């Protein structure tokens, strides 16, 4: 495109040449000739850049919050470029902490320019797709913008640790585990006494009663069964709220809590699944074992639906359709742990609906509100009312602030929920 840098120069050249002829001034004629030369240069063809880009990431698999140096080398494989501006397209979610991700230079054919900058790593897969180049001719009259493909990936997977456990509710699977039931069988806690049946283990025969009455009876012990738990993490755009721009957001805190709780549940023999309350579809069916644990970690760390920034903004999200699809996937014996800041109504409606359907629901809610502003206080009051409404409906709610570690909040409610 034309930059219009020399707009009006043609008229000025004509005026100067005319004045030089009229006054017979050689200096004006020379000035007019110079202006005409500039116009001739302006009429020349715009630059046609031909570039090759190589990008090197110092550490492709860094830990969260690590600072990673990115080096970009651009080689000119075409004609000379007298004014070249380079802009590296840094993935969303990565913050540049040192040096701009751009460079200005001139490149002769076959030469290269290198620039570097530093980003701070955050959880997820981050892909560089391309670099934008803007080239101008020597006079700056024409400008062309193009992109050069250069794919590079940085993968940041947190080392999720087993966190504090929460007491589970009574809805269980047929598999043996740690949740007490009202079903008699093999276990560790007395449940009832029944008549002896052929084949009953001798260890469970009530010999004291046999000695006293002459009748054989068998002791029934309370069975403990494994629970099926599905985590629903709210990753819609409103859920990314934070008390301050530089503070950790509710989604990031919620995923850390989900990962810790899931590790604890899997270690205790329970079956765990996960999904995102999001425009993007993401689902991991409940399971257990080492391979399932690795799948769950990968899902929470790198799936776009759980990304560090909101995803799927170009897709329409209808909570009613999401709930219908989730209900088709959810096992009948599963309980739901909804992880959401509850800054609007859809997650509250989700919790109520599935609690009414018989799936015991626990809401884990990281508080993203602040009292520093009047608007923040109002949002906090509305959120408190939503959580109070859930509690009145019999839904368990864990509410914790950024100043309170999740382990402390979990221990605080564990004793109350266990009673």
Image (cartoon, grey):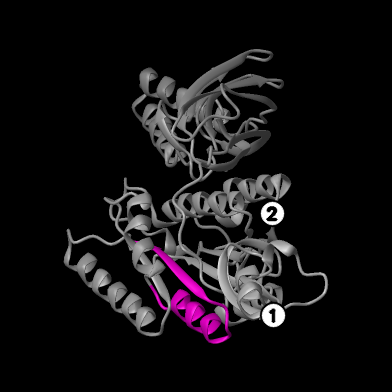
Q: Which residue is mark 1?
A: 215
| Res 277 seen here | no
Q: Position of residue 71 (x, y in %)?
A: 55, 21
Q: Quadrant of residue 1?
A: top right
- The magenta stretch is 344-366
Report whether 9 appears left or right of 230: left
Report whether 309 appears left or right of 373: right
Q: Are marks 1 and 2 in contact (CB under 8 Å)?
A: no
The residue located at (41%, 82%) in the rendering is 394
Q: Nearer the viewer, residue 305 or 353?
A: 353
The residue located at (47%, 70%) in the rendering is 362
Give me the C-alpha separation between circle 1 and circle 2.
44 Å
The residue located at (64%, 70%) in the rendering is 206
Query: Which of the two discs, 1 and 2, labels the residue nearer the N terminus?
Result: 1
- Up-down relation of residue 261 to residue 187 (above or below): above
Numbered disc 1: secondary structure: loop
Report whether 380 appears left or right of 24: left
Total numbered labels placed on residues in the image? 2
Q: Position of residue 391 (x, y in %)?
A: 36, 79
Q: Which residue is mark 2?
A: 288
Examine the structure image and report whether residue 360 is included in the region drawn in magenta: yes
């Amino acid at each position: 495109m034309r930059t219009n840098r020399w707009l009006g120069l043609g008229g000025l050249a004509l005026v100067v040449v005319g004045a030089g002829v009229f006054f017979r001034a050689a200096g004006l004629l020379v000035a007019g000739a110079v202006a005409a030369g500039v116009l001739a240069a302006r009429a020349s063809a715009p630059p046609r850049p031909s570039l090759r880009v190589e990008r090197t990431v110092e550490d492709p698999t860094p830990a969260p919050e690590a600072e990673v140096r990115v080096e970009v080398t651009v080689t000119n494989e075409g004609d000379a470029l007298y004014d070249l501006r380079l802009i590296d397209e840094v993935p969303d979610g990565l913050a540049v902490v040192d040096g701009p991700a751009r460079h200005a230079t001139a490149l002769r054919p076959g030469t290269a320019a290198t620039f570097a900058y530093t980003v701070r790593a955050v959880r997820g897969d981050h892909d560089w797709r391309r670099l934008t180049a803007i080239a101008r001719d020597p006079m700056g009259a024409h400008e062309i913008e193009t992109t050069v493909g250069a794919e590079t990936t940085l993968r940041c997977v947190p080392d999720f640790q087993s966190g504090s456990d929460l007491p589970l509710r009574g809805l269980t699977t047929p598999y043996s585990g740690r949740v007490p039931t009202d079903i008699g069988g093999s276990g560790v806690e007395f449940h009832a006494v029944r008549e002896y049946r052929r084949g009953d283990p001798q260890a469970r025969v009530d010999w004291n009663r046999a000695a006293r009455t002459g009748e054989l009876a068998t002791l029934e012990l309370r069975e403990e069964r494994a629970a099926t738990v599905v985590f629903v993490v709210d990753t819609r755009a409103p859920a990314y709220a934070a008390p301050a721009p530089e503070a950790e957001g509710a989604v990031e805190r919620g995923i850390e809590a989900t990962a810790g709780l899931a590790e604890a549940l899997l270690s205790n023999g329970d079956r765990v699944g996960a999904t995102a309350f999001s425009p993007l579809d993401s689902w991991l069916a409940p399971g257990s074992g080492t391979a399932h644990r690795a799948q769950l970690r990968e899902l929470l760390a790198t799936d776009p639906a759980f990304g560090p920034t909101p995803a799927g903004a170009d897709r329409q999200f209808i909570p009613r359709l999401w709930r219908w699809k989730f209900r088709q996937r959810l096992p009948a014996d599963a309980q739901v742990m909804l992880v959401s800041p509850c800054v609007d109504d859809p997650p509250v409606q989700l919790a109520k609906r599935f609690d009414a359907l018989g799936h015991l629901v626990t809401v884990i809610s990281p508080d993203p509100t602040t009292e520093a502003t009047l608007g923040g206080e109002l949002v906090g009051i509305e959120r408190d009312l939503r959580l109070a409404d859930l509690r009145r409906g019999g839904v368990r709610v864990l509410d914790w602030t950024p100043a309170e570690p999740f382990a402390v909040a979990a221990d605080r409610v564990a004793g109350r929920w266990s009673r």
